Image (spheres, rainbow, N blue to C red):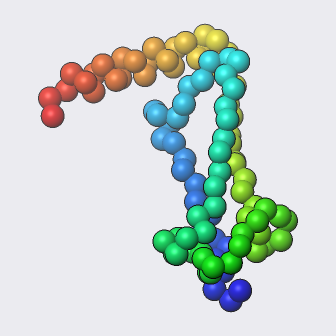
Amino acid sequence: MSNYQFGWHITYPYADDVAPLLPAGTIVHITGWHDNTAANKYNPNPNTWVGGGARSIDEMSFAWVSLTYLEQDDYTQRVQARGKAQQTRNQTPK
């Protein structure tokens, strides 16, 4: 596969002020998919079946998740600060 792009992997990092703040006990479910269509510019051959596996030509979906654990007081303070910031944005004339 001479036109395979190892660097096509995409990340979607959050800005600090919009990264999810999740309360203790939250369960996160992550779903991944492989776009094996001709619309995927990084897909070398949409006619080739793609299955999961450990080879570089296999679909090796991986969810990279970074976590920061907060003490309850810090969590509460951040939630309140975001609420105030959101109110300010909603009150600002556009």
Q: Which residue is farthest left?
A: 93
Would you place residue 5 above or below residue 78 in this image? below
Q: Position of residue 33 (x, y in %)?
A: 63, 55
* Quarter of the rendering occupied by the N terminus: bottom right
> Which residue shows up at 45% across the image and 14% down it?
80
Q: Is residue 63 left or right of residue 78?
A: right
Nearer to the camera, 31 or 26 = 31
Q: Is residue 81 left or right of residue 12?
A: left
Q: Position of residue 87 (x, y in %)?
A: 30, 19
Q: Position of residue 21 (x, y in %)?
A: 56, 25
Would you place residue 80 above or below residue 92 in this image? above
> Which residue shows up at 66% across the image and 41% down it?
30
> Which residue shows up at 54% across the image and 31% down it?
20
> Which residue shows up at 83% across the image and 64% down it?
53
Would you place residue 39 above or below residue 75 in this image? below
Q: Position of residue 72 (x, y in %)?
A: 64, 12
